[in-house]
Image (tube, grey):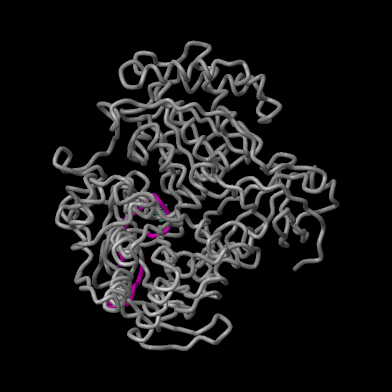
Amino acid sequence: VAELGTPTRSVITTCAYCGVGCSFKAELNGDQLVRMVPWKHGKANRGHSCVKGRFAYGYAAHKDRILKPMIRERIEDPWREVEWDEALTFAAGRMQAIQEKHGRRSVGVITSSRCTNEETYLVQKLTRAVFGNNNTDTCARVCHSPTGYGLGKTFGTSAGTQDFDSVEETDVVLIIGANPTDGHPVFASRLKKRLRQGAKLIVVDPRRTDIVRSAHVEAAHHLPLRPGTNVAVVSAMAHVIVTEGLMDEAYIRERCDWDEFQHYAEFIRDPRHAPEATEMLTGVPAAELRAAARLFATGGNGAIYYGLGVTEHSQGSTTVMAIANLAMLTGNIGRPGVGVNPLRGQNNVQGACDMGSFPHELPGYRHVKLPDVRAIFEQAWGVEIDPEPGLRIPNMLDAAVEGTFKGLYCQGEDILQSDPDTHHVAAGLRSMECVIVHDLFLNETANYAHVFLPGSTFLEKDGTFTNAERRINRVRRVMAPRNGFEDWEVTQMLANALLKAQGRPGWHYTHPSQIMDEIAATTPSFAGVSYERLEVLGSVQWPCDESAPEGTPLMHVDGFRSGRGHFIITEYVATDERTGPRFPLLLTTGRILSQYNVGAQTRRTENVVWHPEDLLEMHPHDAENRGVTEGDWVRLASRAGETTLRVRITDRVSPGVVYTTFHHPATQANVVTTDFSDWATNCPEYKVTAVQVTPSNGP
Ligand code: SF4
């Protein structure tokens, strides 16, 4: 700070690292960013922050930033730096030629949960209104798509039910497959404060995460389940609650579909769901599980928080619905201190999903097959919308390998590094005739691109992010985009190049507030959202409409959106990924506090000490059996591939389970993950891979 001088002005904006959505005051000396100060009036963070939001913004000025567009005829050719006009004309020409030759459904887009609501909205609009298909998908496909499905089916709304403040009235916290200390640090602090005040904690996680036992906090129950058995564990808890008569029958009769409940109760009462019957399968002692279920049902306000350890499974959607069943069963929906709370990973996962990034849904989670919904957008956009749902990311890649999908616009997402089965992703990308990467850096996906469009950072743009509590926060431009344009402007320029080639009128947005006005006009849950209102209120939580002009902190207070809560039968089905003599261990993955996803930003921030490599955590017994000691190199192999990394020996993981992070391209952890995925949404099963670990001499 001393070197950069005394700040002379400040801009309030929102952190772009995780779904907590902390507000920051960016302090500048002239045009020089001096520091990021957590903003005390930020409703999500109240003046708190973690190390990433506070310090990890140096990537915006990193020398690796690509600031000029680049094109090349073939991916084997060197890149050629060009002016924007030439790049956009080249990109539009290629996409147009592909559609003329292979049909309008032969191209698509991937939106980013890092980008703003307005940018995401424009990218899906590009697909639907310019390309004329629904081939739009989002990186939420690989994280929280089962949340959208599962909560939509049970509660009628694809979002968490509570605000963060709610935790202050919680008596029993149930955390399933989430590690808030590392993934959502500011919320974790509030959670720990409540635990120190006496709230009880139950953690369902194969790994003894920090929150299980940390300073002044000790979980009442840690259920270290075998990876892949979430549904069996949650169902066993529900079995105990139903068979011991601990459910909240009055709530169920008043708020839920009673016939569905009776059907569910008959299913869950079956002795096959009893903790004693599932102990061998899940690895969780029956007595512990019974005690945890009784505590959750009888301990007062019970709140459930979950993360990717729930969703990234072949039964991700089933687990989300099982969790929703558990909350309804115990009457823990619709008041402060309770609820079902997905902890979103990226800063705008909620917003990217809200904005119609999925191939079957227009903004506001409305199916493209519904004529009255299409009519709203057809009138607003002046086009006819394809009634057929489009392709999901894995289907795009499959279709590319088969030769029917030829062009992709990928904004703010490195699918080669973040999606499962890296070899298959590469094969898909290599088969395409036009890959447009719109990003900050030449990422791994860009190795297969024909056009590179430079992106802007969150410091360089106006817009909004929606956090895990449905809070719409303003993102404000702190400095001019180094690449010359905000991302929404780039998408608009690409759309206009395509529209010009098609002989159609172009788009004329001059500020993202106009895009938000269009969102509000077409999407009921955003009907009351405007930049003017955000200026006055600071932020609002959707639904925000005439009946709730200041937003909705708690959902389902007077009943569910669909009228009644729906109990869904959640049968446990084992994953197809099995251990055996060749691959006897189960690998699960996660993240650490100081790094972020594939590390594109955090690895390029040099002002703090970051973890320099991914490590493989292994139980001492498994290490001893393999003759491996702390810090040794090991080969991690699965049926899909292999990589090399160093080992950390710890009893945080159970025998038979190993764990690693996925932040470094050198490791490429997703080389070993399989192509199994959630049955309902295709969310990849990152959390269960059968592996072998053997000593190695290093990479
Ligand atoms: Fe940013 Fe999340 Fe840290 Fe808040 S908790 S500063 S939103 S990374």
Question: Does residue 29 appear in this view?
Answer: no
Which quadrant holds residue 654? Answer: top right
- Residue at 53% x, 21% y: name it: 293
Q: Position of residue 352 (x, y in %)?
A: 36, 54
Q: Quadrant of ligand 1?
A: bottom left
Q: Position of residue 623 (x, y in %)?
A: 80, 48
Asked if residue 34 is among those painted magenta in the image, a careful observer would answer: yes
Q: Nearer the viewer, residue 69 or 440?
A: 69
Read off the magenta span: 16-35
Question: Does residue 548 appear in this view?
Answer: yes
Q: Nearer the viewer, residue 699 or 41?
A: 699
Asked if residue 48 is among those painted magenta in the image, a careful observer would answer: no
Q: Nearer the viewer, residue 341 or 404?
A: 404
Residue 81 horizontal side relative to residue 427, left or right: left
- Residue at 42% x, 58% y: name it: 17
Q: Position of residue 6 (x, y in %)?
A: 30, 73
Check the image and report above or below for 85 versus 269.
below
Q: State which quarter of the image contains the N terminus.
A: bottom left
Q: Nearer the viewer, residue 164 or 278?
A: 278
- Residue at 50% x, 17% y: name it: 241
Q: Position of residue 378 (x, y in %)?
A: 22, 56
Q: State which quarter of the image contains the C terminus.
A: bottom right
- Residue at 54% x, 42% y: name it: 679
Residue 270 horizontal side relative to residue 386, left or right: right
Number of numbered discs on residues = 0
Residue 523 horizontal side relative to residue 138, left or right: left
Residue 523 horizontal side relative to residue 46, left or right: left
